[in-house]
Image (spheres, helix red, strand yellow):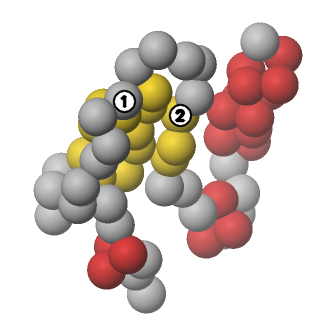
Amino acid sequence: NSYHDFSIDVLGPELEIIGVSPKDNVVEAISHKNYSIIGQMWHPEREKPFENNQSKVFSSFFDA
């Protein structure tokens, strides 16, 4: 099961690629060039068992 069929292939001029899957070269993360905005493909619900260190992503975002 993969969502890589729904990936970004063209970005707006204010966005840049910051993460790519080494497996199939699909864009997995983008950021805005001028604002602190990121977009990331991530499926924590697929992690079984859920790894607690992944909660750091949420914590760092909301504590910033």
Q: Is residue 7 visible?
A: yes
Residue at 69% x, 68% y: name it. Answer: 45
Answer yes or no: do the residues labelled 1 and 2 have beta carbons within 8 Å? no
Q: Residue furthest right?
A: 63
Judge depth for marks 1 and 2 and give the one in front.
Answer: 1
Q: Which residue is mark 1?
A: 14
Quadrant the C terminus occupies? top right
Q: Residue furthest bottom?
A: 1
Q: Residues within 10 Å of mark 1 (few under 14, many from 20)?
A: few
Place of residue 6 in the rendered image (x, y in percent of width and height, measured from the top left)? 38, 75
Provide the secondary structure element on which disc 2 rests. strand
Residue at 36% x, 33% y: name it. Answer: 15
Provide the secondary structure element on which disc 1 rests. loop
Depth order, front residue of 14/31 = 14
Q: Is residue 40 above or below residue 9?
A: above
Compare marks 1 and 2 and give the one earlier in the sequence. Answer: 1
Residue at 48% x, 55% y: name it. Answer: 41
Q: Is residue 19 left or right of residue 62?
A: left
Q: Is residue 62 left or right of residue 25?
A: right
Disc 2 marks which amino acid? Ile
Q: Which residue is mark 2?
A: 38
Disc 1 marks which amino acid? Glu
Residue at 23% x, 60% y: name it. Answer: 9
- The answer to which quarter of the image holds residue 19 is top left
Quadrant the N terminus occupies? bottom left
How far is the residue under mark 1 from the one under mark 2?
A: 12 Å
